[in-house]
Every structure is written in structure tokens, then in C-alpha cells.
Image (tube, rainbow, N blue to C red):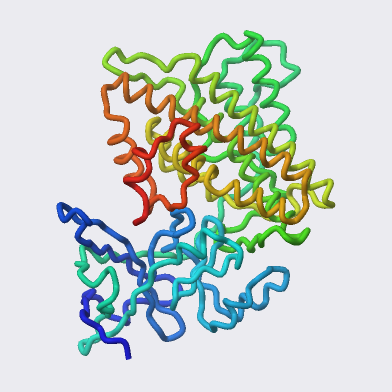
Amino acid sequence: MTPFQRRVSLGVAATALTPATARLRVSLSLPAASGSSRELTDFVVLAHGGSHFCIEAACPHSGGRLFRGVIEDAADIEDLADIEDLAGASAAGVASLVCPWHAFRFNLATGVCDHSSSSAESDTHPAVVLPVGVDDDGTLCLSIPDDSPFVDAAVVSVLPIDVSPKPPKPLALRPAAVERPEIQSQRTWTLVEWAIRVLNEPVPTEKVRLTKHVYALWNDGNISEIGSGVPPDEPARQSEIGRVDPSRTKRRGNGQSLVSRIKILHSLASIEQWAIDLAFDIIARFATVVIGPLQSPMPRAFFGDFLKVANDEARHYTYLSDRLEHLGSHFGALPIHAALWESAEKTSNDLLARLAVVHMVHEARGLDVNPQTIARFENAGDSESVEKLKEIHDDEVTHVAAGQRWFSYICEIERKDKYETFHSLVRDNFHGNLKPPFNEVDRSRAGLDTQYYLPLAAK
């Protein structure tokens, strides 16, 4: 039996946890390496199959809200016959917690990720788990091994989490306004009116066509006024395209089979659709923002930069959609989810927070993982996909650069330290640490030096 040095009481009765909905979010503090402060790490404690488990609350893959994930039994995993490389998970005989962002599955007992035997990032960074026990008085406790880095941890807070399933938002087509911008329209529309028009367009190909049209109008000098308006809470999507909770998204595999590559390309195409909307949302939602002591509006170049981002993303979507059709599938053949939009909702009232989290955290994370995706397609001999994925990656460097450039610009105007401001906003609006390994070369090309992200990185 493993010798335990400490039993840390959580002060909550074991009977308070129910497998379906009730969990605990436990914050532990550790002395920092310098000894001058303490570091916080969040865990989720849950009940399943007559046992209690404690696992890291943030997904080691990309910081997703693992504490809200769905529990998936080993038997359920075995039933997913079209998913590759799951032998290790089913053999373990222990349920997994599924991250709601990218459907990575973490063994509740060991923290090991079964997402792909060839996934370097998931293998290198398993989720941290701690043993859970029940004291004589029936309250839960953590039994921390003496060789654990958390042996000196102190409990800072224990909070209940309600993970009752919530129905997804309806995907009904939004009603058209009495008059709205159209490509054939003869009147002049403001940029914000066009942005809202794109956000309310549910058909992917039409969204792309509108995006290219607006970008051409802007470059030709035919949009003179930025304007103002209220964008939708969430962009429209076709009701014909299935939508699932992110945690129920099936694994995409390692790219070696045709089915796996189609799943990956479909996922990327969905991301590009959201990326078009994120670019138009930042234009519409923050069109009237004023900054600095003089309360100056954002320069016209700000809007031009994000129009270019939107146009790039539209081109990327077209590449991926065409490639799916070439491989015998199409966009919409698989369900989509809206996990990426969560950060847009969380930062809807703060331009600096939006730039930091969406463009300097999420998009920068893409720079870290894209080379691995490209390598998988290269290993599969899919040279046509590789060519487009490399072009997309190079464009994404410029998108991260745009976010960083305008973040730095606003900080300079408002006389804020850009690094301290970034760290504060990410801690407030992004759950968990930033996960290495980092693509330092391409991050540097985008203007993200290590002072931005290393202080937020998982140790």
C-alpha cells in the first residue's frame, strides 16, 4: 500500500456528491518555487460507480473546462466502433472524463489521456489525479502521497458545481430584417451593418461570399462609415447541420485513415466558420469603443485588419470544404459544436480581454498544434491537404500578430503595462494555465514573446 503522508479534509459529506450532477471544485495552494507566493491549482472531485475521484479541473491539452466534462464508461468507449486507438482506455476498465472543448478523454484513476497513442501533447501532459478517501465522520478527504508535488498543499476553497445537462441553443434560421445589406443592394451600408449581416447568415457558402464582398467593398473605398449596431448573441448556423455538446464529439483519430482525416478537416472547417464570425463580431461589438485619456475611437486600420482576418478565414473554409468534397464528404456531414464561442461570450464587454483570450491565447494555441496536424497528414501521404494546411498556418501567424498589435496599441494609449495587463485578463477570463509545448518560433513571428505566455504556463 502506498504510504500517505497527509489526509486533507474537504469538509463535505461523501453523500453530497451525486454521479449525475453534483461535483466539487477544490482549489489547492502550493508554495511557489521562489517561496515568495503561492500557486493555485483547481481540481474537481466527483462520484462515479460507487467510487470518488479527484482530477485536475483544467484540461492539460488546451485549458478546457474539464471539470464540466461528461463521464464516459469504458463500455461506452468500446461501443464507438468507428473511433481509432481506444484499446488502452477500454482495457483499463475505468471511466474517463471527457473535455468539453476537444473531446480528449482522461482516465479518472490515472489521468492518462487516451485521445491518440501518437498524440505527443496528450501523452506528455496527463491530467493530475489525487486519491480520494472518506474519513470516519463520512466527510471526503484527499489522501496525498508523500511523493506528490501537492503534499504541502493547503485547501483554499471547496465549491459545489452543478453540471446538470443544458439543452443546446436552437439553430433555427434567424428571421431576416425588413431591409438588410445584400450583395445586389444599391444603397450604401455601414461596416457594422455588413458585419451583423454576416453574423446572421447561417449558410456557410453564403457567409463566405458575403465576407469576400465586404472585404472588396472596403478595399475599393466603398464603405466610408464604421457605424454602430447590436450584433447577435451567437452567430446563426444552419438547422440542417447537427449540433452536439462538445464533450460528446467523437475522437478524430491520428490522421492515418481516410475517416480520421475527414473528421479532422471537418473540425477545422467548423473552426474557420467560427473564426469568420469572431472577426466580424469584434468589428461590430466594439465599433464604438473609445480608448485613452482623450477617449479616442479605434483607428480605421483596426477594422481593416480584422476584415482581412475574416477574408482569410473565409478562404480557409473554402479550401477545407473543397478538400472534404474531394475526399468524398462535405461540410455538415458531421455535427458541430460551439465551444469556441464561449470565450467570445465571456469577453463580450471588454475589447482588451477579447484580444487577449481569443487572439493571443486561442489562436496562438493553434500555432502550437498546427504543425502536429500537418505532420499527421504528411505521414498519411495527403500532400494536397498538407499544402493548404501550411498556407492556413502561415495566415494564422498574421492573425495572432493582429491581435497582439492592437492589444499593445491600446495598452500604450492607456498607459498600461502590456504584459501585466495580459496576465491579469487571461487569469480572469481563461480557465487554467497555458499548456506547453509552445511553438516559440511562430509565436515570436506574431509578436508574442515569452514574457506574455511563460508566466501563465503550466509548471
Residue appearing at x 73%, y 60% in the figure: 256
The vertical placement of 100 against 429, above or below, is: below
**Which residue reaches farthest left?**
36
Q: In the visual, does 400 lie left or right of 414? A: right
Residue appearing at x 53%, y 50% in the figure: 339
Q: In the visual, does 311 lie left or right of 124? A: right
Q: In the visual, does 96 lie left or right of 409? A: right
Quarter of the picture holding the N terminus: bottom left
Residue appearing at x 28%, y 68% in the figure: 149
| Quadrant in the rendering for residue 295 | top left
Total number of numbered discs in the rendering: 0
Residue 67, image x, y percentages: 41, 63
| Quadrant in the rendering for residue 425 | top left
Residue 313, image x, y percentages: 64, 34
The vertical placement of 424 against 259, above or below, is: above
Q: In the visual, does 3 lie left or right of 229? A: left
